[in-house]
Image (tube, grey):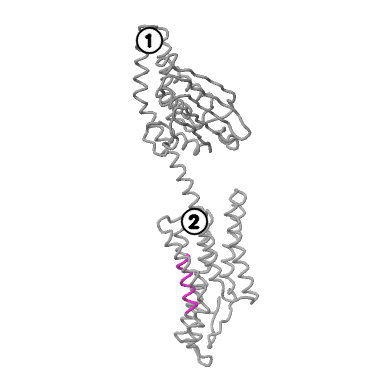
Amino acid sequence: MKLISEFLQLNLLSFALILGIIIMLIENRRERPHGTDHVIAIVVMLTVIVINAGLRDLYMMSGFDSERNYRNDVVMTMFYLRNAIEHILFPMIAYVELLLIAPVRKKHIIFIPELVCIVSEIINLAKPGIIFSFNKHLDCVDGPLMMMPYFVGMIYLLLLMRYSVLFIKEKELSKGVTVIFIVFLTLAECYLEAAYIVKDLMDEIVALDVIIYYFYLVAIYQSEMKIKLHTSELELERSKRMLMISQIQPHFMYNSLTSITYLCDKDASQAKKALIDFSKFLRKNLEAMSRKNLVPIREEIEHTKVYLSLEKIRFGDDLDIIFDIKDIDFVIPVLTVQPLVENAVKHGINRSESGCGTVSISTVETEEYHKVVIKDDGGGFDVESLKDLDGSHIGISNVRKRLYDECGGMLIIKSAPEEGTECTILIPKENHDENSGN
């Protein structure tokens, strides 16, 4: 029992850290962030090192005899293999960490120091003493190249430090700081062991380095996935908008063409103007399918005027239109004003008791927002019904979503039955400078 207790005391932290990395790898097995294969390779090598050290400790606690002559004994052979494996794997881990963290292009050249280390360890197995040897009582005796594995590891750590400076210069601050911390932690461990302040903690430090950087990889992956998801949502909304545009309201087209047909017999010049406006309206909707950026509010207002000129043919004096444009120095998602004005005409004016009314469109600048207000004095509705939209109020949810996603804007709707409706678009000024460059 005492033997098991001492064994666990020496190796429990190492196994716990390795187990923690394995759990994280299993948890993220579906996502597999970039660098996962390198982390798995490091975990395998680290596990070999820890088991290797654990077997040595177990033998030293249970079977070692200080009076025994181990010369030409299988135990001595195993100790030679154990030390060689450890001397090879620690620099190898540093090499794989370098591949994991830095964009190393000439991997075969960077591998040369580790290759020299491997060859030297093989030679040392055949002819002990170049790097290390054991006396008959298994005491390790340093050879002239004893520090070579440590120097190889230092080469990779210095390369990591070089790349960390490049990361910071390239404004990858979080990555640079993370790598610097990992290198500092490893170098501190090397110094403390050389000064005999701590002993046999290198595997724990390496495991901690891997955990730190793997957390960084997962955080970066999640951030990238969040951006991709947001981009996908925007693309989906644009696709919906394209579909909505491609299926321009049949009733509006029918009513417009009917009105134009009527004007052909009554007023040819007015019919010609209406046809020009109708073609402008269709062209604007078709152009909107390929527009990915925000557009000046002037464009939205002009498109809305074209739409209202066509509705004016049908409603005549029953539809009054008021424009009060005081702010034109901002941008807005394409096709956000016209759908709201169409709702005002279709669901406000057309469904009012009198069948007539006024639609007003105004823009104003406040301290925090660029504001667009679309107001009608028509039938109105219960705002709570917007929660269960069935498509009758075209574009409201679509406009609200695009305003928020594309420029951080808001759509506020106030309405009550028989009291009219007021739709307010708010475009934050804090986002305007960024979006105006689109």
Q: Nearest to the eye among marks 1 and 2: give it.
A: 1
Q: Nearer the viewer, residue 33 or 154?
A: 33
Up the image or down, 81 lies above or below 379; here it is: below
Q: Nearer the viewer, residue 4 or 248?
A: 248
Tell me the residue at 56%/26% (across/down).
363
Tell me the residue at 40%/56% (across/down).
30
Measure how far apart labels 1 and 2 are at the Cα level. Answer: 66 Å
User: Residue 240 is drawn in which quadrant?
Assistant: top left
Residue receiving disc 1: 263
The percent coordinates of residue 154 (x first, y second) are: 59, 65
* Sequence-earlier tag: 1 or 2: 2
User: Residue 198 is drawn in which quadrant?
Assistant: bottom right
Task: Label 1: state its secondary structure.
Answer: helix
* Circle 1 residues within 10 Å: few <14, some 14–19, many ≥20: some
Q: Amino acid at mark 1?
A: Leu
* Residue 433 among those drawn in magenta: no
Numbered range of the magenta stretch? 42-54
Image quarter (top left, top right, bottom left or bottom right) of the C terminus: top right
Tell me the residue at 42%/7% (across/down).
269
Up the image or down, 412 lies above or below 66; here it is: above
Could you say which disc has been placed on residue 218 in the image?
2
